[in-house]
Image (cartoon, rainbow, N blue to C red):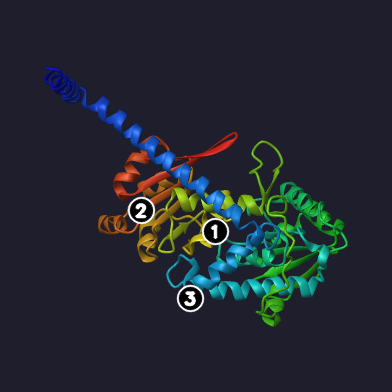
């Protein structure tokens, strides 16, 4: 009697559930998707906490030693002959992990030998004003290998704005070490502004010029030197590392706000935060050494550096860099470079969709691109981009005290 009653109750409950699902399909599946998303998010958080525990066990290895370079050296050992950084244009230069490491060693040794940095150099800030190209990333690696901090200057800055961010970069340095600015020759005209020249003279800055194609004479009391000449004679052997880097406190980077509401503000980025950005993207984006990231963003932007470059160091993936964004070349270069992840901000995806792209080429990209990551994509663009390129889209949004990732 009781068994029959229980069986009848179960059948009735199942029948009610089936009826509800039939007549309220949309609500049911919406709730189901939310539950699945919540479960997936909990699983990812669990993975994050497991990784934190694992990294805590490695503290003796890296916590107060080499900083981010600890992980770079491990990547070079594992992925020596694999592409690390690639110029996106057809026939563009590519550097393997080993080639990048040797050139970064040259940069580090050149900085220490030419400018005589001593053991007090830890955290000394070196501003860089370079084009979006592979050497930008390699230059940062060389600066970190020397135990220094890279200050990433906005290429669009000029006049008072540029003078301000240069001052912010140099004023915290120990003035017993020399102040150096690494600049591409195409930006030398920015130094002609009186405000900028005044800051360079005040801090006795030596301007090290990259891609220099002519003899540079010292002007306005500013000293110039050719970085290309220095690198040509610099050693490829590993430099003497500073082994007392404070993982949590010492700076690896300084980034700057855009300055739309006044003068730009400095945002110091420690080794731990630089590591965290790439490591979180590795977990949430499920990146691996098989991935190739397509980056049209300026490398002084946080998505490009803290997500793109940083994650490549930890996963062995490759980053494909373009000097300037081109919507018409997007699909062609994604396919040409076999890129699996697209890094974006704001309306870049909208511009891509508005470009006249060959349907066959767009279809080929569907078999290559698996993820678009960034911030600021509008809802109408989101759906269209997802259907056009058949890829997942993931965004990050900052909300104190956590950073959330959303996908769909």
> Mark 1–mark 2 contact, CB under 8 Å?
no
Q: Is residue 378 left or right of residue 14?
A: right
First along the sequence among labels 1 and 3: 3
Question: Where's residue 317, x and y in %?
Answer: 46, 63
Where disc 1 sits, the SS reads helix
The quarter in which the N terminus is drawn is top left
Q: CA distance from mark 1 to mark 2?
A: 18 Å
What residue is at 42 percent from the left and 44 percent from the top? 394
Q: Quadrant of residue 175?
A: bottom right
Q: Nearer the viewer, mark 1 or mark 3?
A: 3
The answer to whether residue 56 is seen in the rendering is yes
Where disc 2 sits, the SS reads loop
Q: CA distance from mark 3 to mark 2?
A: 24 Å
What residue is at 73 percent from the left and 68 percent from the top? 208
Q: Which residue is mark 2?
A: 370
In the rendered image of this protein, does residue 95 appear above or below residue 270?
Answer: below
First along the sequence among labels 3 and 2: 3
What residue is at 57 percent from the left and 72 percent from the top? 100
The answer to whether residue 300 is seen in the rendering is no
Q: Which residue is mark 3?
A: 81
Q: Nearer the viewer, residue 325 or 20?
A: 20
The quarter in which the C terminus is drawn is top left
Where disc 3 sits, the SS reads loop
Q: CA distance from mark 1 to mark 3?
A: 18 Å
Q: Quadrant of residue 32?
A: top left
> Mark 1–mark 3 contact, CB under 8 Å?
no
Q: Nearer the viewer, mark 3 or mark 2?
A: 3
First along the sequence among labels 1 and 2: 1
Question: Where's residue 303, x and y in %?
Answer: 54, 50
Q: Which residue is mark 1?
A: 309
Q: How many marks?
A: 3
């Amino acid at each position: 009697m009781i068994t029959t009653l229980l069986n009848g109750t179960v059948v009735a409950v199942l029948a009610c559930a089936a009826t509800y699902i039939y007549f309220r399909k949309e609500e049911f599946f919406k709730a189901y998707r939310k539950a699945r998303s919540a479960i997936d998010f909990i699983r990812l958080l669990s993975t994050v906490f497991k990784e934190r525990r694992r990294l805590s066990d490695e503290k003796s290895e890296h916590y107060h030693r080499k900083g981010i370079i600890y992980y770079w050296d491990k990547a070079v050992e594992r992925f020596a002959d694999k592409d690390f950084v690639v110029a996106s244009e057809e026939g563009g230069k590519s550097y393997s992990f080993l080639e990048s490491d040797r050139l970064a060693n040259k940069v580090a040794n050149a900085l220490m030998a030419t400018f005589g940095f001593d053991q007090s150099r830890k955290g000394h800030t070196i501003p860089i004003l370079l084009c979006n190209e592979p050497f930008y990333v390699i230059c940062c690696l060389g600066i970190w290998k020397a135990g220094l901090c890279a200050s990433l200057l906005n290429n669009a800055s000029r006049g008072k704005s540029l003078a301000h961010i240069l001052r912010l970069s140099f004023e915290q340095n120990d003035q017993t070490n020399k102040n150096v600015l690494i600049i591409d020759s195409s930006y030398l005209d920015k130094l002609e502004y009186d405000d900028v020249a005044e800051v360079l003279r005040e801090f006795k800055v030596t301007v090290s010029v990259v891609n220099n194609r002519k003899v540079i004479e010292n002007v306005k009391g500013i000293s110039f030197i050719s970085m290309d000449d220095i690198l040509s004679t610099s050693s490829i052997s590993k430099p003497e590392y500073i082994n007392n880097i404070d993982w949590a406190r010492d700076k690896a980077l300084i980034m700057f706000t855009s300055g739309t509401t006044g003068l730009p503000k400095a945002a110091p980025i420690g080794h731990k935060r630089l590591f965290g950005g790439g490591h979180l993207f590795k977990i949430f984006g499920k990146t691996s050494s098989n991935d190739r990231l397509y980056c049209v963003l300026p490398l002084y932007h946080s998505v490009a550096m803290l997500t793109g470059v940083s994650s490549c160091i930890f996963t062995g993936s490759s980053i494909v860099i373009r000097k300037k964004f081109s919507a018409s070349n997007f699909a062609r270069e994604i396919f040409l470079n076999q890129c699996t992840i697209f890094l974006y901000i704001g309306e870049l995806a909208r511009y891509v969709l508005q470009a006249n792209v060959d349907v066959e080429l767009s279809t080929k990209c569907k078999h290559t691109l698996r993820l678009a990551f960034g911030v600021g994509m509008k809802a109408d663009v989101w759906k269209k981009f997802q259907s056009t390129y058949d890829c997942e889209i993931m965004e990050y949004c900052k909300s104190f005290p956590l950073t959330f990732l959303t996908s769909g």
